[in-house]
Image (spheres, helix red, strand yellow):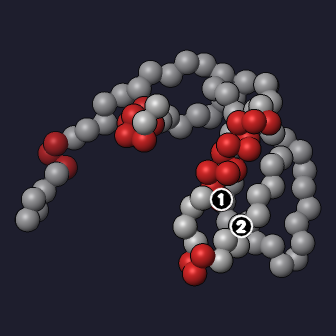
Amino acid sequence: MDTLEAIRTRRSIRRYQAQAVREAELRTIVAAGMSAPSAGNEQPWHFIVILKKLFSLPEDVIPFALIPLGYPAQAYRSEDRFKPKRIHEAAW
């Protein structure tokens, strides 16, 4: 799937299957996250992979984002969200 197709067909998932995400898929997702740009190329990130387990963080660690991963519990169809009336050129 190319990038534009992924953007157009993405959905918010609120219910997931009980199946764990495969290790290879987790590694691919985390590797993609590590490819993101960072200020001054400092690459300050750390990732905690957790599917309903509790975890402890050191005092100096501030969570930045939570990204739920899993397999949808049901099939979703994609919608066309393009609204031409919301495009303005050079003026409102």
Q: Which residue is mark 2?
A: 45
Q: Mark 1 or mark 2: name the one nearer the start of the chain.
A: 1
Q: Residue furthest bottom?
A: 40
Residue drawn at x 53%, y 37% is: 12
Q: In this rendered view, identify the residue nearer to me: 20 or 82.
A: 20
Residue drawn at x 75%, y 36% is: 24
Q: Amino acid at mark 2?
A: Trp
Image location (x, y in percent) of residue 58: 90, 72
Determine whether label 1 and label 2 are within 8 Å by CB: yes
Q: Amino acid at mark 1?
A: Met
Q: Residue furthest top?
A: 75
| Label 1 vs label 2, nearer the camera | 1
Image location (x, y in percent) of residue 10: 47, 35
Question: Quadrant of the image for the C terminus?
Answer: bottom left
Label 1 SS: helix
Q: Residue 54 shows which numbered tag?
A: none
Q: Which residue is mark 1?
A: 34
Measure the alpha-carbon separation of dots 1 and 2. Answer: 8 Å
Label 2 SS: loop
- Residue 3 left/right relative to 39: left
Count of numbered circles in the view: 2
- Residue 61 left/right relative to 34: right
Q: Quadrant of residue 90?
A: bottom left
Residue drawn at x 57%, y 61% is: 36
- Residue 8 left/right relative to 68: left
